[in-house]
Amino acid sequence: MEDVSIIGLDIARNTFQAHGARADGGVVFRKKLARGKVLEFLSKQPACVVALEACASAHHGGREIAALGHEDRLIPPIYVKPFVKRQKNDAADAEAIAEVSSRLRSNQTIRGIV
């Protein structure tokens, strides 16, 4: 999985949904992860952008992910909703989070695309 450039994470209470994509938008993986296994999984991935929906627990998670060497991006949920392509569920949300993150440059904030 060396070609993963963006991982979108949808945070839930017990399970997280991960969507890995290449720079061209192609899907590399879709995984359902238990809360305790997320950091272990991300530590095995090459350094890339990991995007999460901004919420109360996302800030702590973002710091933990950044400590692993990834670039963390917190995306407000209002900007994710228009990118959900099909029925709303955790996997579709993770894909939408990765899509929004792929449209940002590394130094651009979410306000720059509005």
Image: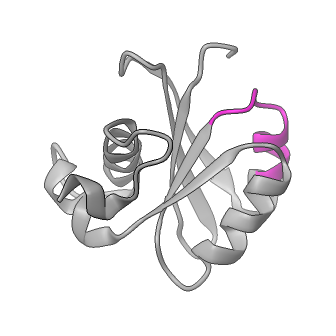
Place of residue 83 in the rendered image (x, y in percent of width and height, measured from the top left): 19, 48
Q: Who's the residue at 75% across and 26% down the image?
A: 46
Which one is in front, 87 or 41? 41
Q: Nearer the viewer, residue 26 or 114?
A: 114
Q: Nearer the viewer, residue 104 or 62?
A: 104
Q: Quadrant of residue 7?
A: top right
Q: Is residue 84 left or right of residue 32?
A: left
Q: Does residue 90 appear to the left or right of 42 in the view shown? A: left
What is the residue that sits farthest to the bottom in this orientation? 56
Q: Is residue 44 magenta?
A: yes
- Percent position of residue 6, x then y: 52, 34
Give the magenta range: 39-48
- Residue at (67, 64) in percent of width and height: 62
Examine the rendered structure and indicate whether residue 76 appears above or below residue 6: below
Task: Give the percent coordinates (x, y) of residue 20.
Answer: 52, 31
The C terminus is located in which quarter? bottom left
Quadrant containing the N terminus in the rendered view? top right
Image coords of residue 102 (percent x, y): 38, 36
Residue at image location 38% in from the left, 50% down from the top:
97
Is residue 71 depicted above or below 59 in this figure? above
Relative to 75, say whether 93 is above or below: above
Task: Confirm whether the magenta stretch covers residue 75.
Answer: no
Residue located 37% across and 15% down the image: 24
Q: In the displayed structure, does residue 51 sit left or right of residue 41? A: left
Residue 77 vs residue 51: left or right?
A: left
